Image (cartoon, rainbow, N blue to C red):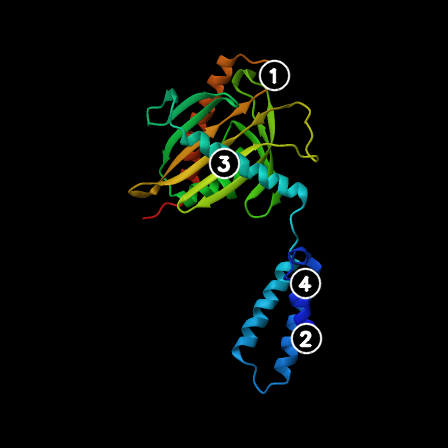
Protein backbone atom coordinates (compact mmCIF):
# COMPACT_ATOMS: atom_id res chain seq x y z
CA UNK A 1 0.00 0.00 0.00
CA UNK A 2 2.75 2.45 0.92
CA UNK A 3 4.51 2.28 -2.50
CA UNK A 4 1.19 2.85 -4.26
CA UNK A 5 0.45 5.81 -2.01
CA UNK A 6 3.89 7.26 -2.74
CA UNK A 7 3.28 7.01 -6.49
CA UNK A 8 -0.07 8.74 -6.16
CA UNK A 9 1.45 11.56 -4.12
CA UNK A 10 4.29 11.89 -6.61
CA UNK A 11 1.78 12.15 -9.45
CA UNK A 12 0.09 15.23 -8.02
CA UNK A 13 3.45 17.01 -7.87
CA UNK A 14 3.15 17.52 -11.64
CA UNK A 15 1.50 20.86 -12.37
CA UNK A 16 -1.09 19.56 -14.85
CA UNK A 17 -2.18 16.88 -12.37
CA UNK A 18 -2.02 19.04 -9.25
CA UNK A 19 -5.02 21.03 -10.51
CA UNK A 20 -7.19 17.90 -10.78
CA UNK A 21 -9.36 18.08 -7.66
CA UNK A 22 -10.45 14.43 -7.89
CA UNK A 23 -6.88 13.16 -7.94
CA UNK A 24 -5.91 15.40 -5.02
CA UNK A 25 -8.84 14.11 -3.02
CA UNK A 26 -7.89 10.52 -3.84
CA UNK A 27 -4.35 11.18 -2.64
CA UNK A 28 -5.59 12.68 0.63
CA UNK A 29 -7.82 9.67 1.30
CA UNK A 30 -5.01 7.23 0.49
CA UNK A 31 -2.64 9.00 2.87
CA UNK A 32 -5.22 8.88 5.66
CA UNK A 33 -5.85 5.15 5.12
CA UNK A 34 -2.15 4.32 5.10
CA UNK A 35 -1.54 6.28 8.30
CA UNK A 36 -4.40 4.43 9.99
CA UNK A 37 -2.89 1.07 8.94
CA UNK A 38 0.52 2.06 10.29
CA UNK A 39 -1.00 3.21 13.55
CA UNK A 40 -2.95 -0.04 14.03
CA UNK A 41 0.24 -2.10 13.70
CA UNK A 42 2.19 0.01 16.19
CA UNK A 43 1.90 -0.26 19.99
CA UNK A 44 1.51 3.52 20.21
CA UNK A 45 1.25 5.85 17.23
CA UNK A 46 3.93 8.46 17.26
CA UNK A 47 3.18 12.17 17.45
CA UNK A 48 4.00 12.80 13.81
CA UNK A 49 1.36 10.30 12.66
CA UNK A 50 -1.29 12.15 14.67
CA UNK A 51 -0.15 15.47 13.22
CA UNK A 52 -0.02 14.30 9.61
CA UNK A 53 -3.37 12.53 9.93
CA UNK A 54 -4.92 15.73 11.23
CA UNK A 55 -3.49 17.76 8.35
CA UNK A 56 -4.63 15.09 5.89
CA UNK A 57 -8.14 15.32 7.32
CA UNK A 58 -8.10 19.11 6.96
CA UNK A 59 -6.92 18.75 3.37
CA UNK A 60 -9.75 16.33 2.58
CA UNK A 61 -12.35 18.68 4.08
CA UNK A 62 -10.97 21.64 2.12
CA UNK A 63 -11.10 19.67 -1.11
CA UNK A 64 -14.78 18.97 -0.43
CA UNK A 65 -15.53 22.72 -0.31
CA UNK A 66 -17.52 23.96 -3.27
CA UNK A 67 -15.36 26.12 -5.56
CA UNK A 68 -16.70 29.37 -6.99
CA UNK A 69 -18.37 29.16 -10.38
CA UNK A 70 -17.37 31.41 -13.27
CA UNK A 71 -20.37 33.64 -12.61
CA UNK A 72 -19.54 33.92 -8.91
CA UNK A 73 -15.92 34.74 -9.71
CA UNK A 74 -17.07 37.49 -12.09
CA UNK A 75 -19.08 39.09 -9.25
CA UNK A 76 -16.11 38.82 -6.88
CA UNK A 77 -13.89 40.51 -9.47
CA UNK A 78 -16.47 43.26 -10.00
CA UNK A 79 -16.50 43.95 -6.25
CA UNK A 80 -12.72 44.09 -6.15
CA UNK A 81 -12.68 46.39 -9.17
CA UNK A 82 -15.15 48.75 -7.48
CA UNK A 83 -12.98 48.79 -4.36
CA UNK A 84 -9.76 49.56 -6.21
CA UNK A 85 -11.32 52.26 -8.41
CA UNK A 86 -12.96 53.94 -5.43
CA UNK A 87 -9.76 54.04 -3.42
CA UNK A 88 -7.84 55.52 -6.33
CA UNK A 89 -10.43 58.30 -6.60
CA UNK A 90 -10.26 59.05 -2.88
CA UNK A 91 -6.47 58.99 -2.81
CA UNK A 92 -6.33 61.83 -5.33
CA UNK A 93 -6.76 64.94 -3.18
CA UNK A 94 -6.67 67.42 -6.07
CA UNK A 95 -9.59 69.38 -7.55
CA UNK A 96 -12.22 68.60 -4.91
CA UNK A 97 -14.75 71.44 -4.53
CA UNK A 98 -16.94 72.05 -1.50
CA UNK A 99 -20.64 71.49 -2.12
CA UNK A 100 -21.95 72.02 1.39
CA UNK A 101 -20.77 72.23 5.00
CA UNK A 102 -23.22 71.51 7.82
CA UNK A 103 -23.17 73.26 11.16
CA UNK A 104 -21.76 70.15 12.87
CA UNK A 105 -18.82 69.98 10.47
CA UNK A 106 -20.22 67.36 8.06
CA UNK A 107 -18.85 68.18 4.63
CA UNK A 108 -19.77 67.20 1.07
CA UNK A 109 -17.22 67.75 -1.71
CA UNK A 110 -17.33 66.93 -5.40
CA UNK A 111 -15.19 66.63 -8.48
CA UNK A 112 -15.67 65.69 -12.12
CA UNK A 113 -13.79 62.68 -13.48
CA UNK A 114 -13.35 62.05 -17.22
CA UNK A 115 -14.48 58.41 -17.22
CA UNK A 116 -16.98 58.57 -14.37
CA UNK A 117 -18.64 61.98 -14.30
CA UNK A 118 -19.39 63.94 -11.16
CA UNK A 119 -18.68 62.16 -7.87
CA UNK A 120 -19.51 63.27 -4.34
CA UNK A 121 -17.52 62.75 -1.16
CA UNK A 122 -18.98 62.92 2.34
CA UNK A 123 -16.63 63.46 5.30
CA UNK A 124 -18.09 63.02 8.80
CA UNK A 125 -17.17 61.87 12.30
CA UNK A 126 -19.59 59.54 14.08
CA UNK A 127 -19.56 59.28 17.87
CA UNK A 128 -19.48 55.48 17.85
CA UNK A 129 -16.60 52.98 17.60
CA UNK A 130 -15.78 51.50 14.21
CA UNK A 131 -17.18 48.03 14.94
CA UNK A 132 -20.57 49.51 15.83
CA UNK A 133 -20.77 51.57 12.64
CA UNK A 134 -19.53 48.64 10.54
CA UNK A 135 -22.12 46.32 12.06
CA UNK A 136 -24.95 48.70 11.22
CA UNK A 137 -23.83 49.31 7.64
CA UNK A 138 -22.79 45.76 6.74
CA UNK A 139 -24.29 43.18 9.09
CA UNK A 140 -27.62 45.03 9.29
CA UNK A 141 -27.71 46.46 5.77
CA UNK A 142 -31.17 45.01 5.09
CA UNK A 143 -32.53 47.16 7.93
CA UNK A 144 -31.42 50.43 6.31
CA UNK A 145 -34.94 51.11 5.06
CA UNK A 146 -36.07 51.24 8.71
CA UNK A 147 -34.00 54.32 9.53
CA UNK A 148 -33.00 56.02 6.29
CA UNK A 149 -36.05 57.70 4.67
CA UNK A 150 -34.18 57.96 1.37
CA UNK A 151 -34.08 54.15 1.17
CA UNK A 152 -37.23 52.12 0.73
CA UNK A 153 -35.65 48.66 0.85
CA UNK A 154 -32.33 46.85 0.72
CA UNK A 155 -32.43 43.12 0.04
CA UNK A 156 -29.54 40.68 -0.24
CA UNK A 157 -30.07 38.52 -3.33
CA UNK A 158 -26.98 36.33 -2.97
CA UNK A 159 -23.93 35.95 -0.76
CA UNK A 160 -20.68 34.87 -2.40
CA UNK A 161 -17.93 33.87 -0.01
CA UNK A 162 -17.42 36.00 3.06
CA UNK A 163 -16.80 39.38 1.39
CA UNK A 164 -19.19 39.71 -1.56
CA UNK A 165 -22.98 40.13 -1.83
CA UNK A 166 -25.44 40.96 -4.59
CA UNK A 167 -28.13 43.40 -3.44
CA UNK A 168 -31.30 45.04 -4.72
CA UNK A 169 -31.99 48.52 -3.38
CA UNK A 170 -35.11 50.60 -3.82
CA UNK A 171 -34.70 54.34 -3.34
CA UNK A 172 -37.63 56.35 -2.05
CA UNK A 173 -39.01 59.16 -4.19
CA UNK A 174 -37.81 62.63 -3.23
CA UNK A 175 -40.23 65.16 -1.68
CA UNK A 176 -42.54 66.51 -4.35
CA UNK A 177 -41.55 63.53 -6.52
CA UNK A 178 -38.85 65.67 -8.15
CA UNK A 179 -36.90 62.45 -8.62
CA UNK A 180 -39.19 59.45 -8.98
CA UNK A 181 -38.55 55.96 -7.57
CA UNK A 182 -35.25 54.41 -8.59
CA UNK A 183 -33.82 50.96 -7.95
CA UNK A 184 -30.34 49.48 -8.19
CA UNK A 185 -28.81 46.02 -8.50
CA UNK A 186 -25.34 46.12 -7.02
CA UNK A 187 -22.38 43.93 -6.19
CA UNK A 188 -20.86 44.88 -2.84
CA UNK A 189 -17.48 44.02 -1.39
CA UNK A 190 -16.46 44.48 2.25
CA UNK A 191 -12.78 44.38 3.22
CA UNK A 192 -10.93 45.07 6.44
CA UNK A 193 -7.30 46.17 6.34
CA UNK A 194 -5.97 46.58 9.84
CA UNK A 195 -8.06 49.23 11.54
CA UNK A 196 -9.60 50.42 8.24
CA UNK A 197 -12.82 49.03 6.75
CA UNK A 198 -13.77 49.58 3.12
CA UNK A 199 -17.28 48.88 1.81
CA UNK A 200 -17.31 49.18 -1.98
CA UNK A 201 -19.84 48.54 -4.71
CA UNK A 202 -20.99 49.10 -8.25
CA UNK A 203 -23.97 48.30 -10.45
CA UNK A 204 -24.23 44.85 -11.95
CA UNK A 205 -26.74 42.63 -13.72
CA UNK A 206 -28.51 39.73 -12.03
CA UNK A 207 -30.81 37.44 -13.97
CA UNK A 208 -33.22 36.88 -11.10
CA UNK A 209 -33.79 40.63 -10.64
CA UNK A 210 -34.93 42.22 -13.93
CA UNK A 211 -36.18 45.80 -14.12
CA UNK A 212 -39.13 46.37 -11.81
CA UNK A 213 -42.44 47.97 -12.71
CA UNK A 214 -42.77 51.47 -11.28
CA UNK A 215 -39.01 51.95 -10.88
CA UNK A 216 -36.32 53.36 -13.15
CA UNK A 217 -33.23 51.15 -13.01
CA UNK A 218 -30.42 53.54 -12.12
CA UNK A 219 -26.70 52.79 -11.95
CA UNK A 220 -24.10 53.44 -9.28
CA UNK A 221 -20.41 53.03 -8.84
CA UNK A 222 -17.71 52.91 -8.28
CA UNK A 223 -18.80 53.86 -4.79
CA UNK A 224 -17.47 53.09 -1.34
CA UNK A 225 -17.46 53.92 2.35
CA UNK A 226 -14.20 54.02 4.28
CA UNK A 227 -14.34 53.67 8.07
CA UNK A 228 -11.37 54.53 10.31
CA UNK A 229 -11.05 55.11 14.06
CA UNK A 230 -10.57 58.79 14.76
CA UNK A 231 -6.89 59.28 15.71
CA UNK A 232 -6.60 59.63 19.48
CA UNK A 233 -10.28 58.77 19.99
CA UNK A 234 -11.09 55.09 19.27
CA UNK A 235 -14.69 55.59 20.44
CA UNK A 236 -15.29 57.76 17.34
CA UNK A 237 -15.23 56.81 13.66
CA UNK A 238 -14.28 58.87 10.65
CA UNK A 239 -16.57 57.95 7.76
CA UNK A 240 -15.83 58.86 4.15
CA UNK A 241 -18.50 58.07 1.56
CA UNK A 242 -17.71 58.27 -2.15
CA UNK A 243 -20.94 58.45 -4.15
CA UNK A 244 -21.20 58.05 -7.91
CA UNK A 245 -24.69 57.63 -9.37
CA UNK A 246 -26.38 57.86 -12.75
CA UNK A 247 -30.06 58.35 -11.93
CA UNK A 248 -31.09 57.91 -15.58
CA UNK A 249 -34.13 59.67 -16.97
CA UNK A 250 -34.38 63.31 -18.05
CA UNK A 251 -33.18 65.27 -15.05
CA UNK A 252 -31.35 68.63 -15.06
CA UNK A 253 -27.83 68.36 -13.65
CA UNK A 254 -28.54 71.10 -11.10
CA UNK A 255 -31.33 69.02 -9.59
CA UNK A 256 -29.21 65.84 -9.60
CA UNK A 257 -26.32 67.60 -7.85
CA UNK A 258 -28.61 69.06 -5.21
CA UNK A 259 -30.36 65.76 -4.56
CA UNK A 260 -27.17 63.71 -4.26
CA UNK A 261 -25.32 66.10 -1.96
CA UNK A 262 -28.42 66.40 0.26
CA UNK A 263 -28.77 62.61 0.27
CA UNK A 264 -25.30 62.32 1.80
CA UNK A 265 -25.99 64.96 4.47
CA UNK A 266 -29.29 63.27 5.35
CA UNK A 267 -27.59 59.87 5.54
CA UNK A 268 -25.13 61.08 8.19
CA UNK A 269 -27.94 62.59 10.26
CA UNK A 270 -30.12 59.49 10.14
CA UNK A 271 -27.19 57.14 10.81
CA UNK A 272 -26.38 59.03 14.01
CA UNK A 273 -30.03 58.87 15.08
CA UNK A 274 -30.13 55.14 14.38
CA UNK A 275 -26.99 54.43 16.38
CA UNK A 276 -28.22 56.59 19.26
CA UNK A 277 -31.39 54.49 19.46
CA UNK A 278 -29.83 51.05 19.09
CA UNK A 279 -26.51 51.31 20.96
CA UNK A 280 -26.94 50.66 24.71
CA UNK A 281 -25.84 53.45 27.02
CA UNK A 282 -23.07 52.46 29.45
CA UNK A 283 -22.49 54.15 32.79
> Circle 4 is placed at which residue position?
25
Q: Is residue 51 visible?
A: yes
Residue 249 numbered tag: 1
Quick one: which residue is furthest to the left in this view? 232
Whether label 4 touches label 1, CB < 8 Å: no
User: Which sits earlier in the primary sequence, circle 3 or circle 1?
Assistant: 3
Q: Nearer the viewer, mark 1 or mark 2?
A: 2
Residue 84 numbered tag: 3
User: Which sits earlier in the primary sequence, circle 4 or circle 2?
Assistant: 2
Q: CA distance from mark 3 to mark 1?
A: 28 Å
96 horizontally vs 81: left or right: left
> Circle 2 is placed at which residue position?
3
Q: Along the line of sight, which residue is nearer the eye, 45 or 11?
A: 11
Residue 190 x %, y %: 51, 42
Q: Residue at x 57, y 67 (%)?
A: 55
The quadrant where residue 180 appears: top right
User: Which sits earlier in the primary sequence, circle 4 or circle 3?
Assistant: 4
How crowded pointer 2 is (Cα within 10 Å; few <14, some 14-19, many 20+) is rated as: few
Q: Residue at x 50, y 32 (%)?
A: 85
How crowded pointer 1 is (Cα within 10 Å; few <14, some 14-19, many 20+) is rated as: few
Q: Secondary structure at mark 3?
A: helix
Residue 146 x %, y %: 52, 34
Q: Secondary structure at mark 2?
A: helix
Amino acid sequence: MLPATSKLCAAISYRHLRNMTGLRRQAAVAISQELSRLASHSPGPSTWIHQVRRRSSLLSSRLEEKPFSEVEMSYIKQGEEALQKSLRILEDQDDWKTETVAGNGDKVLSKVLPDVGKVFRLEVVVDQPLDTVYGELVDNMEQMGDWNPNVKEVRILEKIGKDTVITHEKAAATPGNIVGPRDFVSVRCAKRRGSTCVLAGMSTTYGAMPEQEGFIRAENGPTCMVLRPLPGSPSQTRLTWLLSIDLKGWLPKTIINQVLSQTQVDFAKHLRQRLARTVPVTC
